[in-house]
Amino acid sequence: MQKLTYRADIDGLRAVAVLLVVACHSRIHLFSGGFVGVDVFFVISGFLISSIILSQIQSGKFSLTGFYERRIRRILPALVGVILATSLLAWRFLLPTEMEDFARSLLAAIFSVSNVYFWTQTGYFDAPAASKPLLHTWSLGVEEQFYLLFPLLLYFVRRVFPRRLQSLVIVLAVVTFVASVVQTSRAPSSAFYLAQYRAWELLLGTILSMQILPQLTHRWLREAASAIGLLLIFFAGVTYTLLTPFPGFSALAPCLGAAAIIAAGQAGTSMVGRLLSTRPMVFLGLISYSLYLWHWPIIVFQGLGHILVGTGSVRSIQLVGVIASLIAGYLSWRWIELPFRGGKLKLSGAPLFGAAAAAVACIAIAAGSTLWAHGFTSRFSPQVTRIGAYLDYKSGYREGTCFISTHYAYGKYNPSVCLSAVSGKKNYLLIGDSHAAQLWYGLAHVLPDVNVMQATASGCRPVLRNTEHSSCTQLIDFIYSSYLPSHHVDQLLLAARWEPQDLPQLTQTIAWAQQNNIPVTLFGPIVEYDTALPGLLISALSKNDPSIPARHQLTAFRQLDDKMQQLADSQWHVRYLSYYRTLCHAGRCVEYVNGDEPLQFDVSHLTDDGSIFAIQRFVQQGQLP
C-alpha cells in the first residue's frame, strides 16, 4: 500500500466537479448534465478516505475515534454555518408549509439521512426541488452512511480475512453497480438518492486506493487515460439532461472519467494533471466543499426572495449567483473550515464530540419547535397562509396506480383499473406525463357520460418510440403496441410538458393514430411560471402588485403553443386544446379558482379544482366533445 501524499491534481478534479454542479444548478444550459459532478466527488472521496484508512490499518495506527473526529471536523462546522444562515433566510422567506418541510430537512441533514428524506419527498429534478434549500445535502447523507459502516468492514476484513479484502471490495462494487442499473430502470428516484445504489461509485475510488489495477507507468498511457477521463466527465456534463436515466449505466462515464484521472496521477504527471494542478483550479478545489454547501441555498433564495438582485436578465442573475457562491464558499473555507480543521478552533476527543453533540441538539430543538408551531403561521396573514398551504398540495393523479411517478416502477401500473372500458359510455384514453395526469380529475368530474381511462408516467411523453426511462418506455410501448391495436377508444387524449424537440415524434404519433382510425385530441403546453404560482400570488398580495405572476410566465411555452396550434390546423388536422387561448386574455391568465384557491400548486400543475375549472372552460367553448 503506497502512502497517500498530497496531490494537487485531485484538488483540481474537485474544482471540475463543483463547477459542473454549480453550473447545472444555475441553469446554465451548456452544462445540463452538471449534476454528474457529485459522482466525481464520490469517486474522489472513496479514493482519499480509503487510502487513509487502509494505510493506517496497515501501519497499525488506525483508530475509529480518530477517523470520526476527522470526519466531524471536515463536515460539521461548515454545514452548521450554512444551516444557521439558511435558517435565517427560511424564517424570512418560507411560508409555513415550506418552513415545516425545511425543519424536517434540517433534522435529516444534521443526522446524515438527507438522502432518505428527500427520496421520500421529491425527485431531484422535480419542480418542488427548487424550493428546498437543503436538498443538496443528500450527497452528504450518502457519504456519511457509507463511511459509518465501511471503516468497520475494512478493519474487520483486513484483520480477519486479509487475503479476501480486495475480492470483497470488487464484489461489493459489482453488486451495487448492478443493483443501481436495475433500480434506475425500476424506481429511478431511489436509485438516485439511496446509498446502496451509489456505493459502487465510492468503492471505485477504494479499488484505486488498493492499487488493484495495473499502474500507468508509460507516459503515453497516462496522457491518454487522463485526457479520455476528462472528456468523459465533460461529455456527461454537456450531453446529459434531466431526462437521462440516472445513475445506472449513465453514471459510468463521469465515474470512470474521474477514476482514469486519479489512476493516471498515481504513476506520474500528465498534461491534464498539470492543468488540474494550476493555482486557480487548486484554489477552487480547496473551497469546493464550502462552495458546494453555499451555492444551492443562494440559488433557492434568489428564486424565492430575490436576495441578490430584484430584476435582470437570466444571464446576469446567473452570473451574480455564481459570484456570490464563490465569495460565500471562500469565506466559509477561510473562516470556518480552516480554523476548525487545523487552527485555533480545532478540537479533539471529548471536547470535539461534546461540541458536535451540542450543535446537533440545538439544531434539532429548533427544528422540533418549528414543527410544533406548524411553521410559525403567525408570521403571515390567514389568506397568505391559506394560499401557501397549496405548496404542499397532494393531487388526485391516482399516483402509484394509473400515474407512475419516480417513486414507482411500471409493475405498479394497474391496467384492470386504469384501462377498464365501460359499455354505454364513450371511452377516452388519456396518456402522457404528469401534465396529462393532472387532467384526469377534471375530465372524470366534468364529463359524466365519458369513461376516462388513464396511462401516465412521470416525465413520459406519449409519443411512439419513446426512450425516456424504463417505466415510461414500457407503458407507452404497451399502449401503442398492445392495447390500442386491440381495443377501441373514442378519443385518444395526448398531453405532456411539450418542448420543441418533441414535435417530429408527435407528428409521427398523430399520423399513426390517424392511420389506425383513432381520433386524437391534443392538449397544448400549460401556462408555466419560473416560480410556484402560490408563491407568486403571495408576492403579488404582499407588494400589492397583481402583475407579478404574469411577469414570471415562461414565454417559450406560449410561443410553442402558437406553433402547435398552427401545426394542428394545417398539418396534423386534430382537435387542439390551447390553455393559453382558453385561460388567458390580454397577457393575464387565470390564477385563482373558487375565490382564493390557486389554479396551480407549483410552476405548472393544476390543483384538482383547477383541473375541473380548465376542463369546464374547454367544454364551454365547445372544444371537448
Image: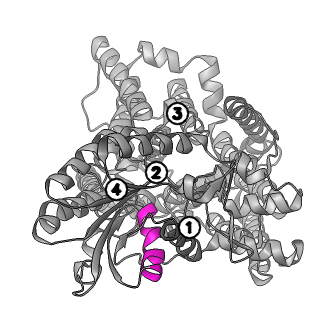
Residue 79: name its quadrant. Answer: bottom right
Q: Which three-letter amino acid code belongs to the residue tagged 4? A: Arg
How far apart, in angstroms, are the residues tagged by discs 2 and 1?
62 Å
- Of callouts 2 and 1, the N-terminal one: 2
Q: Alpha-carbon distance for marks 3 and 2?
A: 50 Å
Alpha-carbon span between mark 1 and mark 4: 57 Å
In this image, 257 relative to 427: left or right? right
Q: Quadrant of the N terminus?
A: top left
Q: Is residue 324 magenta?
A: no
The numbered dot on residue 29 is 3
Please say if the residues under marks 1 and 4 sit with CB atoms less than 8 Å apart.
no
In primary-sequence order, the first of circles 1 and 4 is 4
Q: Which residues are magenta?
A: 434-446
Cα distance, mark 4 to mark 2?
A: 11 Å
Q: Mark 1 highlights which residue? A: 606
Q: Kindly report the distance in space between the C-alpha atoms of the residues bearing marks 1 and 3.
A: 27 Å
Element on which disc 4 rests: helix
Are dots 3 and 2 in contact, CB under 8 Å? no
Instruction: Specify few, some or many for label 2: CA neighbours under 10 Å numbering under 14, 14-19, or 20 or more.
Output: few
Foreground label between 3 and 2: 3
Q: Which is nearer the N-term, disc 4 or disc 3?
A: 3
Quarter of the view holding residue 407:
bottom left
Q: Earlier in the sequence, mark 1 or mark 3?
A: 3
Residue 532 on image: x %, y %: 66, 58
Secondary structure, magenta segment, majority class:
helix
Q: Residue type at mark 2: give it.
A: Gly
